[in-house]
Amino acid sequence: MATRYTIGSGVVISALVLTLIALLIPVDKFGGRATAAAAGPVGDDDGAGIMSTAYGPLTPADRDFVRKVRLAGLWELPAGRQAQQRGTRPSIRTAGDHLVDGHTELDRQVIQVGAALGVDLPNQPSAQQQDWLGQLTRAQPGEPYERLFVQLLRRAHGKVFALLAGIRSQTRNSMVRALATSANATVLDHITVLEESGLVDFDSLSDAPPPPAPRPAALLGSPSTPSSPRPVAHRLGAHAVSSDVRPTK
């Protein structure tokens, strides 16, 4: 009996110890996760955590955003200057003007923000951005160059929107918020002038796979059969309007 009692007591004590350990470990883990979640979407985490500044907390996501604004200017400014020189269409030269003007001002702002918040900024484009500039430099003059210019820049600006929305809605740093607001206006302006060139291939902008090809009509059943599904165009009728169509002036 004594042996069984001793063993039983040992089991109870071991269980209590394990319970305490189990309670302590999740607190540490989930506490860390809560901090990361409150920080908002994080891109490249520099490992410095959340910093206190005179303008509010500065998260890894905030610093990543500031650096990406600087990176955008490092390749879009040269691309804009090149379009001013190489563009044969007025719309391409206009797009180049907007890129140069917009990123000159945005670059001035981001350098001020970086200095005020102690964020180290890049001084040269990323490897991918350098590759894009190389493609533009090597492109044949005229339409081949202009189509590549529009597509590369329109695609890059489109991807920035998700980042801008996340930062603008979640940052608690007033300087980062102001920069995001300014960047949003600049990006929208650039997207607009690029699309006004008429050279954007919207089908190739998305990273998602193309939708499946429509099934042959024979597989959808006979039109005379009441239970057969009707073609989408027939069901929508006059209300089938593409989201890309803008009202005529």
Image: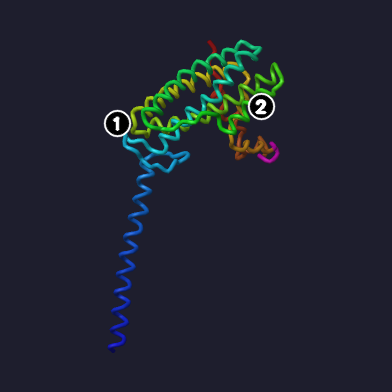
Quarter of the view holding residue 39: top left
> Are there few (<14), some (14-19), or many (20+) residues within 10 Å of tag 1?
few
Q: Which is nearer the eye, 155 or 100?
A: 100
Instruction: Tell me residue 40's x, y (percent).
Output: 39, 39
* Magenta stretch: dominant secondary structure: helix
Q: Position of residue 247 (x, y in %)?
A: 53, 15
Instruction: Between label 2 and label 1, give the one nearer the viewer.
Output: 1
CA distance for labels 2 and 1:
43 Å
Location of the N terminus (image quadrant): bottom left
Q: Nearer the N terminus, badge 2 or badge 1?
A: 1
The residue at 38%/32% (across/down) is: 118
Q: Which residue is mark 2?
A: 135
Q: Secondary structure beneath disc 2?
A: helix
Q: Look at the picture and state if 72 lies above or below 83.
A: below
Q: Secondary structure at mark 1?
A: loop
Whether residue 64 is situated above or below residue 35 in the rendered picture: above
Q: Which residue is mark 1?
A: 54
Q: Which residues are magenta?
A: 216-220
Along the line of sight, which residue is nearer the eye, 16 or 65? 65
Crowding near the residue tagged with mark 2, few <14, some 14–19, many ≥20 C-alpha atoms within 10 Å: some
Nearer to the camera, 244 or 203: 203
Q: Any mark on residue 204, and which? A: none
In the picture, measured across the screen, residue 190 lies left or right of residue 24, that is right
Give the residue type that dot 2 points to.
Answer: Gln
For the point 58% across and 24% down, the residue is 153
Going by the numbered disc 1, the residue's amino acid type is: Ala
Q: Is residue 42 left or right of residue 81?
A: left
The residue that appears at 37% across and 31% down in the rendered structure is 117
- Does residue 132 show up magenta in the picture? no
Task: Name the residue at 52% across, 27% down.
Answer: 72
Could you say which quadrant of the image residue 233 lies in?
top right
Position in image of residue 169 (x %, y %): 38, 32
